[in-house]
Amino acid sequence: MDKVKLNELTGGALQEKFDQALETVVANMQDPNTPWKNRRAITIRLTFEQNEDRDDATVNVSVDTKTAPVKPIATRMAIGMDLETGKVYAEEYGSQIRGQMSFTTSPQVPSELLIDGKVVDTSTGEIKTENVVDFRAAREA
């Protein structure tokens, strides 16, 4: 029997399918979202079906890959029931707990506030006064 060259079988289509499967498997191995330890596989299957006279056969050629699944992405959800409406809720919150206010969504604070009749700088918390003492002038005297 003559040897069959796999790269010539099906007019080179088997080689093409294998090359595509190899690229898929290697890309999956390089994906940081998949577990590194899982085994990957390429299966080349040739299925032979002959006729009753045994002088002709149909050969089906398939190439299958087995890759690692993508790791699931975890999140956190606050769940409960709104006591006012009686409706249940589920809200994703990530690093922020339900009901907390984040700095990015907090209302704009003015640069100055009036507290007890005194002007307060909101960025430093200092009380602003009209009586500025220049200690540099006192040192030079």
Image (spheres, rainbow, N blue to C red):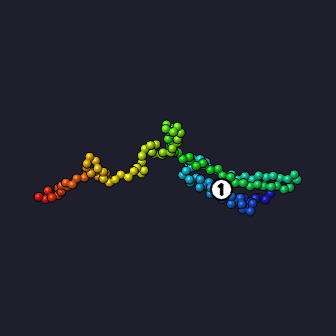
Q: Who's the residue at 59% across and 53% down the image?
A: 28
Give the residue drawn at x 62%, y 57%.
23
Which residue matches tag 1? 21
135 is higher (above) or lower (below) than 89: below
**In the image, residue 84 above or below residue 61:** above
Quadrant position of the C terminus in the picture: bottom left
In the image, residue 120 lies at what x, y percent? Answer: 28, 50
Closer to us: 65 or 117: 117
Q: Position of residue 20 (x, y in %)?
A: 65, 58
11 relative to 122 in the view: left or right = right
Residue pictured at 29% horizontal, 50% vertical: 114
- Please state the total of marks drawn on the protein image: 1
Q: Residue at x 74, y 55 (%)?
A: 61
Report the front residue among 90 and 88.
88
Neighbourhood count class around disc 1 (C-alpha, 10 Å): few under 14, some 14–19, many 20 upward: many
Q: Which amino acid, mark 1?
A: Ala
Q: Quick check: can you spot residue 55?
A: yes
55, 102: nearer the viewer: 102
Q: Residue 57 location in percent, x, y?
A: 82, 55
Q: Secondary structure at mark 1?
A: helix
Residue 110 position within the rendered picture, expressed as x and y whole percent measured from the top left: 34, 53
Q: Is residue 57 left or right of residue 63?
A: right
